[in-house]
Image (cartoon, rainbow, N blue to C red):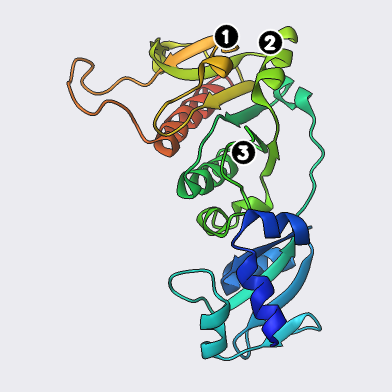
Amino acid sequence: MTKAEIQLVRSLADKRSRTEHGLFVAEGHKFIGELCTSALRVRKIFALEGLFEGGEVETVSSREMERLSLLKTPSDSLALVEIPHHPFRPDTAQRELVLALDQVQNPGNLGTIIRLADWFGIPEIVCSPTTADCYNPKVVQATMGAILRVKVHYTALEPYLAQARERNIPVYGTFLEGENIYSTPLTPGGIVLMGNEGQGIAPAAARHVSHKLFIPPYPADRNGSESLNVAIATAVVCAEFRRQASAKR
């Protein structure tokens, strides 16, 4: 392992470097094992002895892994993976459920949402340019491998949502003044818009929402927390969409 390789890996903690090199970092033998059987191209693997074999694998010591790892607790292996370029098809929401994220900035939240999308069979997420980078090491690890199956796109949300409305694609969003999600009929396809951790959905994106939803507390008149964490709210919303879809079959 060379000094240049160490510098390259460490630099990939920064988005600018990831963009420049077209690479992101994945850590842990289970995750990397999934990567090796996926469509993504693994450029290089650094691993403790006996974990992986192949021409792209370089065996390193525990001390060297400590120098390479971008995690607080060093893993047993690290891979350099080429960033995929997924074709963006705005009409996907006509037939399938799509998540749209407006300025979701916490890497842990984004990683969890990608994992939720994978769990609930949502193939694509559309993010505003100000949403956290899905190839940030913290996001990648939080997805627990879901980043291999869920396609994440970055684009200006307002034109995307406006175009969806022109095509009569329903756009859902969560608001305090929305209708109870559990008594509102939900469609199998459409866009579910989730907002920033502190500010919620920005007004520019909110004006394109056709169906405002509300996740009620229990009991309904309870005076408790003001709101839910965006990842938790996404889980509740996705679960109800899928519950209703399953009930209609």
Badge 2 amino acid: Arg
Circle 1 crowding by C-alpha within 10 Å: few under 14, some 14–19, many from 20: some
Image quarter of the C terminus: top right
Q: Which residue is mark 1?
A: 210
The residue under label 3 is 121
CA separation, marks 3 and 2?
23 Å
Residue annotated with mark 2: 165
Nearer to the camera, 13 or 91: 13
Residue 173 location, x and y as percent? 50, 19
**Horizontal side, residue 56 vs residue 100: left or right:** right
The reply to whether dot 3 and dot 1 touch (C-beta < 8 Å) is no
> Whole-percent x and y of residue 15?
64, 54
**Res 189 visible:** no
Q: Quadrant of residue 166?
A: top right
Alpha-carbon span between mark 3 and mark 1:
23 Å
Residue 44 at x, y percent in the picture: 74, 75
Residue 153 appears in view: yes
Left or right, 216 with respect to 134, comes to left
